[in-house]
Image (cartoon, rainbow, N blue to C red):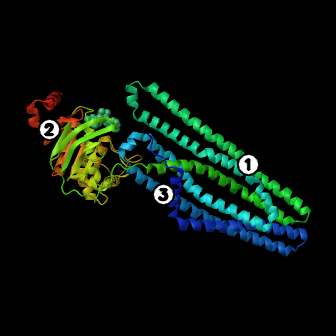
Amino acid sequence: MLLPTADARTVRTRSLALLKNYRGQLARVVIVQALAAVAALALPWLLGDLVDAVATGTTVAFVNRLGLVLVGVVLVQSLLTRFAHRDAMILGEEIFARLREDFLATVTHLPLSTVERAGTGDLIGRTTNDVDRIQWMVRFGVPRVLVTSSTILLTVVAALLASPVTALSLLVGIPIIVVAVRRYLRVATPAYLRNSEAFARLNGVLTESVEHATTVDALGLGRRRRRITDRAIAEAWDTEVVTLRMRVSLFFWLGVSFMLPVAAALLWGAWLVERDAVTLGAVTTIALYAMQVRPHVSELLFWVDELQVALASLSRIFGVSLVEPDRAASGAAPDDEHIEARKVRYAYRAGTDVLHDVDLDLVPGERLAVVGPSGAGKSTLGRMLAGIHPPTGGSVTVGEVPLVDLPEEDLRSHVALVTQEHHVFVGTLADNLRLARPAASPEEMRQALDAVDALGWFGRLEKGLETEVGSGGTELTPAQAQQVALARLVLLDPHTLVLDEATSLLDPRAARHLERSLSAVLAGRTVVAIAHRLHTAHDADRVAVVEDGRIVELGPHEDLVAAEGEYAALWHSWQQE
Ligand code: ADP
């Protein structure tokens, strides 16, 4: 169940829509390049004139004058080429930046369940390999295609103007090019698509094996993982060989078709000169054009090849935006902060419910601890309460409006989730905190860090909020990263917070202290804390015990202990530890 890929038509319309934003710049690049090409074409023309003049007898003064003109033309052409290159490169960068921004926006709004089902390898493949392949095409390909194709076109026009009969020789390579390129194009896109998919699978297999190396070791799956990896490598290799063969054959025939026109121009030209049909100068001009256009045709075809790779990657990149959203904002606005789950069911895989008709009425401002054995469905319930997934059945509402009917930004102002998995983004500590509230002042950020007991280590950072963190910067410990995630939550300030073992990486004493300072700041907020340390439950207003996808006990700590049920048993055994 990989993420979708866009079909050829969608790729075309999306690419054109993207390019449309740059119509003015594209036109400018083409015009400046056309001027540069015209200047380049003047050289063989002038040399042809020179040959004719010398053949028929001329003065030294004429030759000198022509020499000066040639120098001038070379200068003008160099200047124009420089500007054309510069504009084209800037344009390529801008288009690529736009493409990447759009892609990132799409990726960050993908429904989580779809990504989980497709496997992260697929998405990682698209955001790395595919983006890299396109980057090359957009940055250098788009500008160079503009440059080479306008040069080729103008060369043909100039050759026809110089001597239509001799120019015919330029055409002899065309049939070979057409046949070779068409044959190539027919097989190329599907082959490159298979190639990308094979590499995405390889990526996924490797990522999974590396990320979960300890599990692989613990369960003795080493040999099996190696077998799967070998198979994925073999598949990637096979698809790579196929595309390589295609290219080798293509480039052989192209080589032939490039040399043919030069030879033809000389032979055909000599025959015509003998019969006085054309001048020696005209043949010189055409032969020089045939030589001069060769690298451009070769480059254009190189980019046609690259374009196939890029199109395959583009269809995977645009494909991501074809993922059906799992929610649509209905426009309804909640009028209070009351969160309620009614008959909530959820299945990661169709037919296997992990939550069974769960009802939970959160009292605004309460702190609820959720406890229970591992695999009972606590995290899933947390995700439901935070609106991460739409429930498979039933509803979770805030002020009577289903969470999944709210636009994403609104949703996060009501309820937010912090799990054990968190990410330190490359940037300053302030950047990491401002993700939650872009306008946060340094003072507010410091208060948020205070609320999560982070002032101790924060005080030791020389550059304070401006410290570079994340890969390449100051490495935060997992516990510190967890505190940063919680500080973000404080800044975001939703009325309801779901903490899924959000303090698990701190030592128990520090965790309890953090939870207490956090609750001082969060007074009045509703907090759902999924906990494996029972002191969290002890400190909470109510405790919910989840077992096998159901809430089996719900009430204040004292009541549940007195009732001597599941919770009481958990509590006693935990205390003995
Ligand atoms: P807890 O938080 O109580 O440990 P979870 O909510 O994580 O329990 O898991 C409940 C059940 O759902 C478990 O059987 C688990 O295997 C399954 N589950 C959890 N996450 C996924 C997922 N992403 N895909 C498929 N099954 C999942």
> Ligand 1 is found in which quarter of the picture?
top left
The residue carrying mark 1 is 255
Determine whether the residue tagged by mark 3 lies in a helix, strand or loop: helix
Q: Position of residue 250 (x, y in %)?
A: 68, 45
Q: How would you rate the neighbour count of disc 2 (Cα within 10 Å): few for under 14, some for 14-19, many for 20 or more?
A: some
The residue carrying mark 2 is 554
Determine whether the residue tagged by mark 2 lies in a helix, strand or loop: strand
What's the distance in space between the residues labelled 2 and 3, CA to CA?
52 Å
Q: Is residue 94 at all visible to an observer of this figure?
A: no
Query: Which quadrant does the C terminus fall into?
Result: top left
Looking at the image, is mark 2 or mark 3 nearer the viewer?
2
At label 1, the amino acid type is Gly
Q: Position of residue 92 (x, y in %)?
A: 54, 59
What's the distance in space between the residues labelled 3 and 1, CA to CA?
35 Å
At label 3, the amino acid type is Ala
The mark nearer the N terminus, 3 or 1, is 3
> 475 or 94, which lies in front?
94
